[in-house]
Image (cartoon, grey):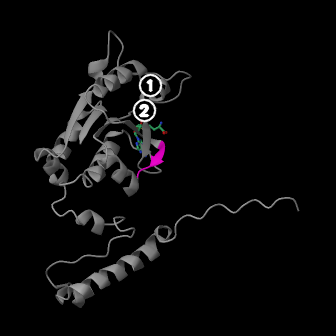
Amino acid sequence: MRFDIITLFPELFLPFFRCGVVGRAFSGGLARAETAQLRDYCEGAHGADDRPFGGGSGMVLAAAPVLAAVRDMRKRNAGPVIYPTPRGEVFSDAVARDLAKLPGCIILCGRYRGVDERALEAEADREISLGDYVLSGGETAAMAVMDAVLRYVPGVLGNPLSAEEDSFGGGLLDAPCYTRPEVVEGRAAPAVLLSGDHAAIREWRQARAREMTAERRPDLLSPPQPPPSKMEGG
Ligand code: SAM
């Protein structure tokens, strides 16, 4: 899978591309990622950003360099152009699985007040939000998307079952986990986890996962209901 990231801050991605599961995906050739500096697509005296028409706070990323950068990326990446933005569809495990099936994607990182709407109308294929808060740039959102997506690219996780065992994989939150020592400040790890009885351990984890989900995310247990039909007349 190939990621092309358009950003004003390519240096933010350097440690991300090198560390942990994501780093292994790239160093092992299972995925590749490149950053493009938006400023390299500016022409003449015009910069990457300008004051917003109509006034107000914050600069706006100008349409011309964004369009030029996206179109250049499209020559090497057949995937959709994703714009991370608070107004997008909320990112989730289902969206990550969906994106992992693609040959790649191009991620356009906004900054300041945002991106000139005309560039988005012309080239953004999908808008994704990390949640109901505002980040100062799309770079951290791009990293979150890449991280979650790469976990579903075959071969990236050493144990392919881990994604299914983690939260959302089986539709539930994950069960609590423990490691040595057996007792920490008087708190003992659950005895069943030390029993060696794999069936009992599986059952315990399933039960704790259900409890945790019921307590913290009951919405995951009950699929959304259709809205009640309107009463006619009366
Ligand atoms: N004016 C925009 C608004 O109120 O919706 C926020 C702009 S924000 C300061 C700069 C950039 O950060 C955005 O263009 C977007 O790319 C990114 N961003 C901010 N919050 C985000 C979120 N919740 N999810 C995804 N991207 C986000």
Report which residue position mark 1 lands on. Answer: 119
Q: Which residues are magenta?
A: 87-91
Instruction: Tell me what residue is drawn at x 32 percent, y 36 percent.
Output: 79
Query: Is residue 21 left or right of 129 when viewed as pictured?
Result: left
**Residue sitting at 46 percent across and 43 percent down?**
86
- SS category of the residue bearing label 2: loop
Which residue, given by chain and number where applicable, does mark 2 sit on?
124
Q: Is mark 1 within 8 Å of ligand 1?
A: no
Q: Between 205 and 101, which is closer to the camera in this rendering? A: 101
Task: Give the tally of numbered discs.
Answer: 2
x and y, in percent, of residue 136 in the image: 38, 40
Is the residue under label 2 in contact with that under label 1 (CB below 8 Å)?
Answer: yes
Please, what is the three-letter code of the amino acid marked with disc 2?
A: Ala
> Image height check: is 225 above or below 103?
below
Q: Which quadrant is home to the C terminus?
A: bottom right
User: Relative to residue 135, is residue 14 drawn left or right?
Assistant: left
